[in-house]
Every structure is written in structure tokens, then in C-alpha cells.
Amino acid sequence: MPELNRESLREILEDWISGNSLSASSREKLQVWALADSLRAKAFGITSENVAEVLDFRSHLFTHLHPQVIAYCQNKNFTSRPLILETLWELWLPLAIQLASWRRNLSRPLIQGILGGQGTGKTTLAAILTLILKHLGYETISISIDDLYKTYSERQELQKQDPRLVWRGPPGTHDVNLGIEVLTQLRQQKTPVEIPRFDKSLWQGAGDRTTPEIIEKADIVLFEGWFVGVRPIDPKTFDSAPDPIVTFSDKNFARDINFKLQEYLHLWQLLDRLIILYPVDYRLSLQWRKQAEQEMIASGKTGMTDEAIEQFVQYFWRSLHPELFIKPLVKNLDLVDLVIEINSDRSPGKLYQPGD
């Protein structure tokens, strides 16, 4: 049988959704493809014994859900249709099926953590998973670490106490106790539960807490954010930290933020599992942010200059540098269940379990 490459995979999927039935030859190619990437197959529990059954179920979902997924992604101007189909087949569907399986093994809602920096696709992933899981019969809600920001007035007072907290985002700018309370209520299946929501447009972009969302039921909770699950590290690490943690002041700031992470550990303990969206190079977040701002400016909206973006992104690298905090997690099998690499074009890349 000829080897199935990425282009031929897309051709099979495109032909499939055009109304043609999936041929026996194409089914066999998809099975070979599913087993060829041994790390991905292992992560999703696919073996030579169950591959036919697994792909039959995935095929059923693909047939029913691809119109909704394509419509959602195109409405959000998310990538090309071939890549949407490939990502749906290769990532979104098997991951949703896996979440449903994990949920069935619990007698309460599953709290799934998703760690990913800016531009890694956390919001899109959560939205697509919610759509698929609803089709599977599971009510899913998304909560961002951003929804736990302290109120505008509280952050104004916080900035007076520590002028270094010029932007919301780093550890110390969230109401951790609120997060613990909400996730605990969800785990205990309390009803109703008030889910905090944050509006970034308020106060000229400074943002503030807004009307909570009332939830009556949640089977699966997707809790996402740029440092969800991140643990404190040895303060001595900052003695020889990477750029832009350079000056004495930079290192003190990094140590102080590292210390504030201690407050979040009780929140992380409420996570059942953790997925990391891991860019092949952390510096891509700067490139992605510049692209996003340029697109906003081109559409007639206001946006940040490249210089302002660099200052903004480097501020977050000083607070929690990806090389120091995220990279070690990728190898930690005790804390992380799945790693999804993100390519420079924001497409999903390698997928594996830590340690593989």
C-alpha cells in the first residue's frame, strides 16, 4: 500500500466531505496512518487490535460534526479548510473522545486543565471540544484563568502597593480563593454555580469582573490559561536566568512572582488532568502577537505598535519565563497527561505523553 502522507490525508478527508463514501482502501490507509505515529497512537490508546473500531467511531463523529466545526472556524477566520479537517480528524475528535472516556471513569465532573501561552489556540480548542462533547451527551463549560482576575478597584490598589504589576496577568492579580470555591462547587456538583466572567474591554481596556454565568450542570470543565498548573521553581534558578531576566531588578521581580505561585497550588490540586499546548519555540508568542495586532490595525481597529508589543510580551517572560517554568513540565509525567506541540503556523504538531 502506498504511504499515506499529510497531503493525501487531506485529500481523503476533502473527498469524504464532498459526499463520496469512504472507500475500503481509504479506511485502510487511515488505519495505517493512525498507527504510524506511535507516540500519538499511544497517547490516544490506539493499538493494532482496536484501530478499526476506534476509527469507525471517529468516522461517525466526523461525518456528523464537520459542517459545524468548519462553520465555527471560518467564522473565527481560523486557518484553511484542509487544515481544519486534518485537525478535526487528528486532534479534536480523538481528544474529545478521550475526555469523555476520562469523565465516564469519574462519579463527578472532570476538571481538565489546559496550559498554553498566547496564540496557542486555547480558546479554539475549548470551543471545538465543547461542541463535540455536547454531541456525545456531555455538558461542558470553559473557565479561563482570566475570569478569576481581581476586580478593577482591587487591581488598582494592588498596583499602588506594587508598581511593577503594570499589567493584569501575572500571579498575584487573580482571586485564587474564588477559583478554588468555584471549582470545588463544580466538583461537588452543587447547583446552580455562579461562574465568574471578566470583560477585558471595560475601563479603557483595563478590564473588570462582569455578570457571572449561572450554570445548572457541568459534566466536564475546561480550565485554561497561560500558566494553569505551573509550579514554583528553585529561586536560585534566577541567578542565571535567560533574557529578558537580566538586571538585578528583573531577577527580584521574577523571584517575587515565583513566590506568588505558591498561592495557586491549592487551585491546581483541583485539576484532574493537565494538557499543555507547547510552541516549538516560546518566542513565537511575540511573532503571533505582532501578527494579531497588525491584523487588527488593517481592519481599522486600534492596535499596539511592535515596540509596545515587545515590551508587553517581555514583561510576561520576566514574570514566568517559558524556558524556566513550562519546559520542565513537558517532561513531568506526574503532573502532565498530554503535550500538544504547536508549529510556527499555529497548526498542531507532535502529540505525546511526558516521558515518551
Image (tube, helix red, strand yellow):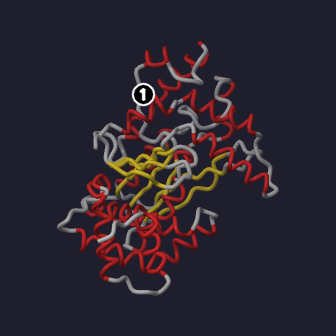
Q: Residues within 10 Å of mark 1 (few under 14, many from 20)?
A: some
Question: Image quarter for residue 37?
Answer: bottom left
Disc 1 secondary structure class: loop
Question: From this viewpoint, which residue is outermost toward the front?
Answer: 2
Q: Which residue is mark 1?
A: 232
Horizontal arrangement in the rendering, residue 214 relative to residue 164 (left or right)? left
Residue 129 or 109: which is nearer the viewer? 129
Q: Amino acid at mark 1?
A: Pro
Residue 127 in the image: state x and y as whole percent.
51, 62
Relative to residue 264, is residue 62 depicted above or below? below
Q: Residue at x 25, y 62 (%)?
A: 46
Residue 34 or 224: which is nearer the viewer? 34
Question: From this viewpoint, which residue is outermost toward the left?
Answer: 49
Residue 129 or 343: which is nearer the viewer? 343
Q: Residue at x 37, y 73 (%)?
A: 137
Q: Residue at x 21, y 62 (%)?
A: 47
Which quadrant holds the N terminus? bottom left
Residue 332 in the image: state x and y as whole percent.
32, 37
Relative to residue 266, is residue 43 depicted above or below? below
Which quadrant holds the C terminus? top left
Residue 144 in the image: state x and y as whole percent.
52, 50
Residue 34 in the image: state x and y as whole percent.
31, 64
Relative to residue 240, is residue 356 depicted above or below? below
Residue 8 or 46: which is nearer the viewer? 8
